Image (tube, rainbow, N blue to C red):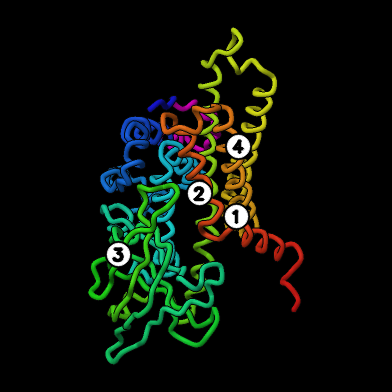
Amino acid sequence: MTEYGPRPVDRRLPTEEARDLMTLVRELAEREIRPTAAEEEDAGHFPRETFTLLSESGLLSLPYDEEFGGGGQPYEVYLQVLEELAAARLTVGLGVSVHTLACHALAGYGTKQQRAEHLPDMLGGGLLGAYCLSEPSSGSDAASLTTRATREDGGTWTLNGTKAWTTHGGVADFYTVLARTGGTGAHGITAFLVPGDAEGLSAAAPERKMGMKGSPTAQLHFDGVRVPDSRRIGDEGQGFAIALSALDSGRLGIAACAIGLAQAALDEALSYTSERQQFGRPIVDFQGLRFMLADMATQIEAGRALYLTAARLRDAGQPFSKEAAMSKLFCTDTAMRVTTDAVQLLGGYGYTLDFPAERYMREAKVLQIVEGTNQIQRMVIARHLAGPETR
């Protein structure tokens, strides 16, 4: 297996602390993640030990308040950390993004007592989270979900239904679950924090995926799962608004992961074309290939600038939903183009398992689908530009 090392990205970080953090992340990624990424992905190995190490290093808590064990870092910094991790192995970068998404509801909408009780372990206690919104019959139309939570005597809720496409399904320690507590539509949905070992909760066999084989994606079955009201997050009926808020931030995480993957593919293509000799000179000397590399680098820089612009809006407390959708759309489309071009630049070797370019290409595809397909992102952007559709 041939894999070239990464080229350092010229990052403009806001503080010396952030620069030190990025150095730590880069060293950890090169020492602990990248060397075994290809082998473990081929074997479908979920790197739980890596997530434990990230938790111990404070890297699962970066964008959350220090009061409850968070890292207190702005999204501008957190997303660049995600990019570095995804460049080393997408399963890890995306896993951190999903964990952050799973913590969002409690951190943003939980009571102070709930946050004090649960957040320290969720952020830095070695726990790993997952997010349960999609269902077998409600993916893009998430407001039509049917998993139901029924209030019993004494304030306990009973959950019944099936969730689909759950990253970390079956291996997570806790799940943020959106379930119907009222009538139809978005206003009848409530959020719950469900322990991974809750009685009546089970996971199906992981989906057999084209890429990211080390990241388990599975259906979850809720068969009379009892959850105390103290684990209800926010008000009854507020769940869909909580979910949308989380997804705006989560889409930025996907955008950053996409740029990390694209950067890894560009680095691979640059290294290979600089060493590969044809007609008595390195193939990187040929103008057609140089133009491809230039386009790849330009698209990556544009994507990075777009997601950082959205992150800075978020950090400033300004609306960023449109920019998050634009970032997710552009950055994941960029990852697909760049990884495809990387395979082309490696020629026949790009199509073999001896180089990681083919894995990057397979992994890029899922980023155009998760956390809202890119068609949904276009709908979100258009709604911000032209208002809701008329019927």
Q: Looking at the image, is mark 2 or mark 1 earlier in the sequence?
A: 2
Kindly tell me whether residue 128 is visible in this rendering.
Answer: yes
Kind of element beneath mark 4 = helix
Q: Amino acid at mark 1?
A: Ala
Quarter of the image with the N terminus in it: top left
When asked about the image quadrant of residue 120, the answer is: bottom left
Which of the two residues, 353 or 110, is positioned nearer the viewer here? 353
Image quadrant assignment for residue 12: top right
Q: How many marks?
A: 4
- 3 or 1: tag closer to the N-terminus: 3
Disc on res. 118:
3
Badge 3 marks a residue whose secondary structure is helix
Q: Picture coordinates of residue 387 (x, y %)?
A: 74, 69
What residue sits 36% from the left and 69% below the top?
112
Q: Dot 2: what SS?
A: helix
- Give the mark nearer the N terminus: 4 vs 1: 4
Magenta-drawn segment: 5-20
Sequence order check: which comes first, mark 3 or mark 4? 3
Separation (CA) of disc 4 from disc 1: 16 Å
Decide if residue 224 is on the left or right side of residue 260. left
Mark 3 nearby-residue class (10 Å; few <14, some 14–19, many ≥20): some
Which label was assigned to residue 91?
none
Residue drawn at x 37%, y 30% as measured from the top left: 30
Q: Are marks 3 and 2 in contact (CB under 8 Å)?
A: no
Please name the residue that numbered disc 2 is placed on: 75
Q: CA distance from mark 4 to mark 2?
A: 19 Å
Mark 3 vs mark 4, foreground winner is: 4
Q: Quick check: marks 2 and 1 in contact, CB under 8 Å?
A: no
Residue matched to label 4: 300
Which callout, 3 or 2, points at the residue further toward the start of the chain?
2
Depicted 282 relative to depicted 320: above or below? above
Three-letter code, disc 4 = Ile
